[in-house]
Image: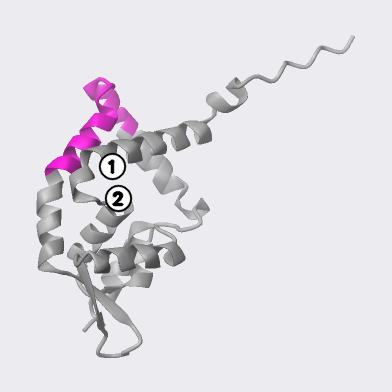
């Protein structure tokens, strides 16, 4: 006699890693936005500012690779950061069509000022876990992200940022 199929329940969604990762991403963004609300900065804008500060003169294509963010969407992020006076675009000496990105004084100040809020947001995300579990989770997440990097629509290519330093200017 054939066995009855197991009835489909919401556990088919709620217990899956993809769903849990998506929910944690929603929670992480909500916490970041709440902690950093006075700075009116999103997590992607923050990542872009850090990358531009770390790699002055980076172009948008390499910035996209360094923060693993879709190049077409990153254009609007760059426009907003420029409109806020946090970054400036300058033509590259080797090719005037290429625009290089630099942090302004206001951008550098924002990064200095926002750091305590960012640190609070990161701590809040992990706060419900015991310290040992936080360490385990972070290690496993880093491993999963690294091992699945190539499956991403926008793989992380941090090494690409270093490449431009010899040619920027």
Density class for disc 1 (Cα within 10 Å; few <14, some 14-19, many ≥20) is: some
Q: Residue at x 15, y 48 (%)?
A: 114
Residues at discs 2 and 1 in contact (Cβ within 8 Å)? yes
- First in sequence: mark 2 vs mark 1: 1
Residues at marks 2 and 1, CA–CA distance in whole angstroms: 6 Å
Q: Quadrant of the N terminus?
A: top right
The magenta region covers: 116-137
Residue that carries the numbered disc 2 in the rendered image: 42
Q: Is residue 159 magenta?
A: no
The answer to which image quadrant residue 118 occupies is: top left
Above or below, 95 relative to 14: below
Residue neighbourhood size for the residue with mark 2, other residues' Cα within 10 Å, grouped as few (<14), some (14–19), many (≥20)? some
Q: How is the image coloured?
A: one colour
* Main secondary structure found in the magenta portion: helix
Is residue 42 placed above or below 128 in the rendered structure?
Answer: below
Residue 138 figure quarter: top left
Q: List x then y, in percent, for residue 158.
A: 32, 61
Q: Is residue 126 magenta?
A: yes
> Which residue is painted at 19% across and 67% down in the image?
85
Instruction: Residue 99: give x, y in percent of width and height.
Output: 30, 80
Asked whether the viewer can see residue 25, the reply is yes
Residue marked by disc 1: 33
| Secondary structure type for disc 1 | helix
State the mark number for residue 159: none
């Amino acid at each position: 006699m054939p066995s009855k199929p197991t009835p489909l329940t919401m556990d088919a969604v709620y217990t899956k890693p993809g769903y849990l990762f998506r929910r944690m991403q929603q929670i992480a963004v909500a916490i970041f936005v709440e902690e950093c609300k006075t700075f009116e900065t999103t997590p992607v804008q923050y990542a872009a500012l850090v990358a531009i500060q770390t790699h002055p003169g980076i172009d948008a294509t390499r910035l996209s690779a360094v923060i693993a963010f879709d190049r077409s969407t990153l254009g609007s992020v760059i426009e907003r950061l420029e409109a806020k006076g946090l970054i400036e675009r300058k033509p590259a000496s080797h090719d005037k069509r290429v625009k290089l990105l630099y942090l302004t004084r206001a951008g550098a100040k924002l990064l200095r000022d926002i750091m305590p809020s960012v640190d609070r947001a990161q701590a809040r995300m992990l706060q419900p876990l015991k310290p040992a579990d936080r360490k385990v989770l972070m290690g496993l997440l880093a491993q999963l992200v690294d091992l699945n990097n190539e499956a991403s629509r926008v793989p992380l290519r941090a090494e690409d940022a270093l490449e431009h330093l010899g040619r920027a200017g």
